[in-house]
Amino acid sequence: MIERRWDARCSEIVRRMAGHYHDDEIAASIEAETGKRFRRRTVAEYRRAGDLPPCRRNDWTAALKVWRGREA
């Protein structure tokens, strides 16, 4: 079993993807590239600790909320 210890390679992946992808997607990339599994929350904690930008917003839901509001 591979130990789940955060290392420089994990940090590099987070730095590369921060601000462009959600934490779930970053966690999946870390697993694919290193074989180490981390929870979304763990990725978010390391992202915040590194003062990296937050994950991108889910912009399509704003339009959906407006659309639903017009219907009601």
Image: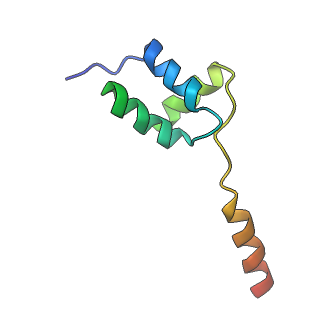
Viewer can see residue 72: no
Identify the residue at horizontal 58%, vertical 24% (top origin). Answer: 15
Relative to residue 53, is residue 23 drawn left or right? left
Q: Which percent across, then down, holds residue 30? A: 41, 30
- 20 w.r.t. 72: above or below: above
Identify the residue at horizontal 62%, vertical 39% (top origin). Answer: 20
Identify the residue at horizontal 54%, vertical 39% (top origin). Answer: 23
- 42 w.r.t. 67: above or below: above
Determine which quarter of the picture holds residue 36: top left
Relative to residue 22, is residue 7 drawn left or right? left
The C terminus sits in image quarter: bottom right
Relative to residue 64, is residue 7 drawn left or right? left
- 4 w.r.t. 39: above or below: above
Determine which quarter of the picture holds residue 70: bottom right
Relative to residue 21, is residue 40 drawn left or right? left
Q: Residue furthest left?
A: 1
- 56 w.r.t. 5: above or below: below
Q: Which percent across, then down, holds residue 18? A: 61, 32
Q: How many marks?
A: 0
Viewer can see residue 35: yes
